[in-house]
């Protein structure tokens, strides 16, 4: 280029696009959010339509809904709830649904192997071969299997090395579960002859090596001899409080405090009580143990004529004899527009 020819001017830069003003920016963001919401809603509706168009899809959608807290929160809003907090009630109803569903699944994973000469039934279960007492209905056995497949008392923490009292041992299924969870020793109270035979068969190994100690008595507030009336098709429901039938057997009862002293226990970390209406009497017979060791508690409160009263009586008894416990609700039942816990948990403060 000749020296006297002027250089060409640089190309003009494009002017920057002005940023939208505050109001315009907010409107654009709002439109994007609305668009994303509508897109998600449309996608959800399409999925729901596809799911509900087939029986399998409707089943999946129904199970997903029931597994969420939504229907139970609605039930808590609509029903009378005389004992538990709203959240505890919702979770308790959800737990009941999970166990009911598991009981249905148990029919696929469990089967009767044989019945012995005494009428006791040997079942194949998810936790091995297990004996159940004569007279047990298939429904009650499958429900029991489902409970313990799901931990039975999910609100009761079992820690490695725990010393546990199982009051109302039935056939030893919960004892088996807590041993698997890490408990070092379990003291099992069970007074019924048929259940005792099943425990001896089901827990032969742990009984022999000392991890399980079997007490062939019921728990009460004093040493006494009473009649244990039988629930004809559900031996887990035998009771010294409620007259379930004309059949029964004479049993021995004792107190938790007496057995703890006799065995010289130096720790008690967990107590489970499932004794068909005798809960208050058993707790009064455990005053010394509760105050000395402060164990974590699970108390089953179902199978009484007035469940609301029984729950309140159990809570009041703990407040009287061991006021350092706080209570919370577990498994709940919804009947006649009323939510009532069938399990209470107590934690030492």
Image (tube, rainbow, N blue to C red):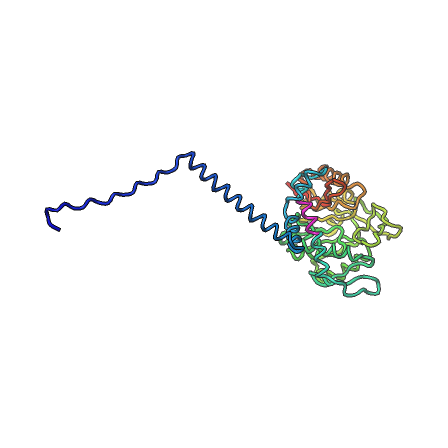
Which one is in front, 287 or 329? Answer: 329
Q: Quadrant of residue 130?
A: bottom right
Stretch in magenta = 91-99
Answer whether residue 213 is magenta in the image.
no
- Residue 135 relative to residue 27: left or right: right
Which one is in front, 68 or 188? Answer: 68
Taking 203 as reference, is 266 above or below it? above
Can the viewer see residue 197 in this picture? yes
Magenta stretch secondary structure, dominant: helix
Give how far across and how far down residue 35 sits, in percent: 50, 43
Give how far across and how far down residue 36 sits, in percent: 50, 44
Q: Quadrant of residue 343?
A: top right
Q: Residue at 87% across / 50% down in the picture?
A: 245
The quadrant the C terminus occupies is top right
Which one is in front, 9 or 169? Answer: 9
Can the viewer see residue 293 in this picture? no
Give how far across and how far down residue 127 sits, in percent: 69, 60
Give how far across and how far down residue 309 sits, in percent: 77, 38
- Residue 100 relative to residue 68: left or right: right
């Amino acid at each position: 280029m000749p020296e006297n020819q002027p250089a060409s001017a640089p190309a003009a830069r494009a002017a920057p696009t002005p940023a939208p003003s505050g109001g315009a920016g907010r409107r654009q963001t709002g439109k994007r959010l609305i668009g994303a919401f509508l897109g998600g809603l449309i996608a959800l509706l399409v999925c729901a339509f596809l799911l509900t168009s087939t029986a399998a899809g409707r089943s999946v959608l129904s199970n997903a809904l029931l597994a969420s807290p939504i229907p139970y929160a609605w039930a808590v809003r609509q029903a009378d709830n005389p004992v538990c907090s709203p959240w505890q009630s919702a979770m308790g109803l959800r737990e009941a649904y999970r166990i009911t569903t598991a009981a249905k699944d148990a029919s696929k994973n469990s089967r009767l192997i044989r019945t012995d000469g005494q009428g006791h039934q040997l079942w194949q279960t998810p936790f091995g071969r297990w004996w159940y007492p004569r007279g047990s209905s298939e429904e009650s056995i499958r429900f029991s299997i489902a409970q313990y497949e799901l931990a039975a008392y999910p609100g009761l923490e079992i820690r490695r090395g725990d010393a546990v009292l199982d009051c109302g041992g039935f056939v030893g299924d919960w004892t088996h579960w807590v041993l698997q969870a890490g408990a070092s020793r379990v003291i099992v109270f069970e007074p019924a002859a048929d259940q005792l035979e099943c425990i001896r068969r089901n827990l032969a190994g742990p009984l022999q090596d000392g991890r399980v100690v079997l007490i062939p008595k019921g728990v009460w507030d004093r040493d006494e001899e009473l009649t244990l009336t039988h629930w004809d098709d559900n031996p887990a429901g035998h009771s010294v409080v409620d007259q379930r039938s004309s059949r029964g057997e004479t049993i021995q009862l004792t107190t938790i405090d007496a057995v703890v002293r006799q065995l010289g226990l130096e720790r008690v970390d967990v107590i489970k009580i499932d004794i068909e209406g005798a809960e208050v009497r058993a707790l009064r017979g455990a005053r010394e143990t509760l105050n000395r060791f402060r164990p974590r508690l699970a108390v089953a409160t179902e199978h009484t004529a007035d469940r609301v009263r029984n729950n309140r009586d159990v809570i009041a008894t703990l407040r009287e004899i061991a006021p350092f416990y706080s209570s919370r609700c577990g498994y709940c039942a919804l009947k006649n527009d009323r939510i009532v816990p069938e399990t209470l948990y107590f934690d030492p403060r």
